[in-house]
């Protein structure tokens, strides 16, 4: 009985050793080498994993930074210039200077400027509403006001103003990750350079209707008259 038990234990130990050796050689055979600089580079990134750089998270960005000799086209909007400078110094590569950006909402059609012509009785989602019809006002280009942009922001940088019905961007919190830009089905949110002293010049309307149709739908809608161009003393 004791001999049988000893033989059984010996066989199991032998099989275990054989399996361990086989697994070791298999692991060595199919081992994938990963550049240790990727971990170091990822540690220098902010870790927001917002996708604003165009990659699936900071890990993907770190891999691209390490593998590409030319990283001038790569940029982390959350970390900005300081982060890119730190990464470039570590990797010994050159990085292009880029001005900080911020999200802007190109719609001035507040609740008092755009009269409601109907009521949307469905899911409170801009994407859903835009897929079904033009919206609750006569302007089919303006903000739908359901806040899809606010829900995708990981930095609490954009909120709906209940008085105007429009989203407002907190420039101090905005990292220009572009999540709100992608979430807006009307394409009224854009990333623009912050500009000197936070000043930016842009038309606060994306309407493409004729003048009469525009003014009927929104009292502040752009009708393309060109007066702003003629009156600007700085040709801006």
Image: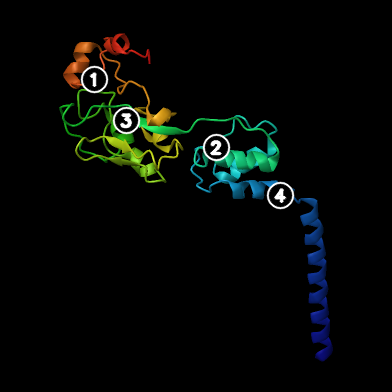
Residue 140 quadrant: top left
x, y (%) of residue 107? 29, 27
Please name whichever residue, 204 or 200, is drawn nearer the observer in this view of the structure: 200
* Distance of label 2 from label 1 (alpha carbons): 36 Å
Mark drawn on residue 131 = 3
Instruction: Tell which tag, 3 or 2, sits nearer the viewer.
Output: 2
* Distance of label 3 from label 1 (alpha carbons): 23 Å
Please report contact status of discs 2 and 1: CB closer than 8 Å, yes or no.
no
Q: Is residue 39 left or right of residue 50?
A: right
Please report contact status of discs 3 and 4: CB closer than 8 Å, yes or no.
no
Please report contact status of discs 3 and 1: CB closer than 8 Å, yes or no.
no
Instruction: Tell which tag, 2 or 1, sits nearer the viewer.
Output: 2
Please report contact status of discs 3 and 2: CB closer than 8 Å, yes or no.
no
Please report whichever mark, 3 or 2, sits nearer to the chain's N-terminal start. 2
Residue that carries the numbered disc 1 in the rendered image: 221
* Distance of label 1 from label 4 (alpha carbons): 55 Å
Q: Is residue 121 left or right of residue 203?
A: left
* Distance of label 2 from label 4 (alpha carbons): 24 Å
Residue that carries the numbered disc 4 in the rendered image: 36
Tag 2 secondary structure: helix
Q: Residues within 10 Å of mark 4 (few under 14, many from 20)?
A: few
Residue that carries the numbered disc 2 in the rendered image: 81
Task: Write the residue at 60% across / 47% down.
Answer: 44
Q: Is residue 31 left or right of residue 105?
A: right
* Distance of label 3 from label 2 (alpha carbons): 38 Å
x, y (%) of residue 77? 50, 37
Residue 197 in view of the camera: yes
x, y (%) of residue 11? 82, 76
Instruction: Tell which tag, 3 or 4, sits nearer the viewer.
Output: 4
Please report whichever mark, 2 or 1, sits nearer to the chain's N-terminal start. 2
């Amino acid at each position: 009985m004791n001999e049988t038990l000893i033989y059984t234990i010996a066989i199991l130990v032998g099989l275990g050793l054989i399996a361990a050796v086989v697994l070791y050689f298999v692991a060595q055979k199919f081992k994938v080498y990963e550049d240790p600089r990727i971990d170091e580079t990822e540690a220098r990134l902010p870790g927001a994993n917002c996708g604003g750089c165009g990659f699936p998270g900071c890990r993907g960005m770190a891999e691209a930074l390490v593998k590409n000799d030319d990283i001038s086209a790569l940029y982390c909007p959350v970390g900005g210039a300081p982060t890119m400078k730190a990464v470039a110094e570590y990797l010994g590569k050159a990085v292009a200077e880029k001005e900080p950006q911020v999200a802007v909402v190109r719609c001035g059609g507040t609740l008092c400027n755009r009269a409601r012509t109907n009521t949307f009785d469905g899911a409170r989602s801009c994407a859903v509403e835009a897929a079904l019809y033009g919206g609750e006002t006569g302007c089919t280009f303006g903000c739908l006001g359901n806040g899809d942009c606010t829900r995708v922001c990981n930095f609490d940088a954009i909120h709906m103003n209940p008085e105007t019905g429009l989203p407002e961007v907190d420039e101090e919190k905005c990292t220009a990750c572009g999540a709100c830009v992608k979430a807006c089905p009307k394409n009224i949110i854009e990333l623009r350079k912050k500009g000197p002293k936070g000043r930016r010049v842009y038309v606060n309307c994306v309407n493409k209707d004729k003048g009469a149709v525009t003014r009927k739908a929104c009292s502040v809608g752009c009708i393309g008259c060109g007066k702003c161009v003629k009156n600007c003393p700085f040709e801006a």
